[in-house]
Amino acid sequence: MTVIQPILQNTVVVFSKAYLPLARINIKRAIVLLITGQAESLDFGNTQVWEVRSPNQVLRVSEHIRLLMGNPERMWKIPPVNRREVLKRDQHRCQYCGSHRRLTLDHVIPRSKGGLHTWDNVVAACEPCNSTKSDRTPTQAGMTLQSKPKAPIHPAVAFADQFWKSQENLTH
């Protein structure tokens, strides 16, 4: 017995005019982009194509579409260094012990020692680790950061990286 998945539950990968994978959108949004001439279907050989029918039209929607106009790589501002953004970047984990509980922000180089409130100096830390580290650098406190703090990357670049890695896994 074959199970038929409703077409409108599928998603489509949107590429920029320069073929940078930008995002995954629902097929309804893709249909609007195709009908209004803002996008075209792409065929990478093994691409899934769905037929969407209306009373007077049959539209072939590929699982990959490319935008034809606009500048989807528009300016993206690095978000402010605040609790929500730092926790998101650090995946809600203490950067010293990996705990998910009672998270605070820690200045790697303490502000009292000239450390700035910047992306490369602020990390998520649980209260016990933050208390242990106190007003010292990680080296002085005998602690090690699990990852080097840095500003978040553009969401389209993150999606593109994830997209190409998933394509690599499909071909192997």
Image (spheres, grey):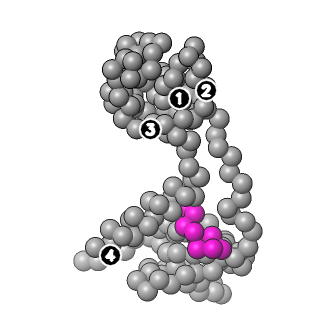
Mark 4 and mark 2 in contact (Cβ < 8 Å)?
A: no
Distance from the alpha carbon under mark 3 to that under mark 1: 10 Å
Distance from the alpha carbon under mark 2 to that under mark 4: 43 Å
Total count of labels: 4
Mark 1 and mark 3 in contact (Cβ < 8 Å)?
A: no
Picture quadrant where residue 56 is located = bottom right
Tell me the residue that label 1 is attached to: 122
Residue 51 visible to the viewer = no
Mark 1 and mark 4 in contact (Cβ < 8 Å)?
A: no
Q: In this view, does 59 lie above or below 3?
A: below
Q: Give the range drawn in magenta.
A: 14-24
Give left or right: position of 72 versus 91: right
Outermost residue, right direction? 70
Residue 74 visible to the viewer = yes
Tell me the residue that label 4 is attached to: 171
Q: Which of 3 and 129 is in front in this view?
A: 129
Q: Which residue is at a point 48% across and 29% down the rendered structure image?
A: 123
Give left or right: position of 139 versus 50: left
Residue 107: x and y, percent? Answer: 52, 23
* Number of the front mark, 4 or 1: 1
Tell me the residue that label 2 is attached to: 117
Tell me the residue that label 3 is attached to: 148
Q: Quadrant of the C terminus?
A: bottom left
Q: Which residue is at a point 44% across and 81% down the rendered structure image?
A: 47
Label 2 Cα crowd, 10 Å radius (few <14 / some 14-19 / many 20+): some
Q: What element carries label 4?
A: helix
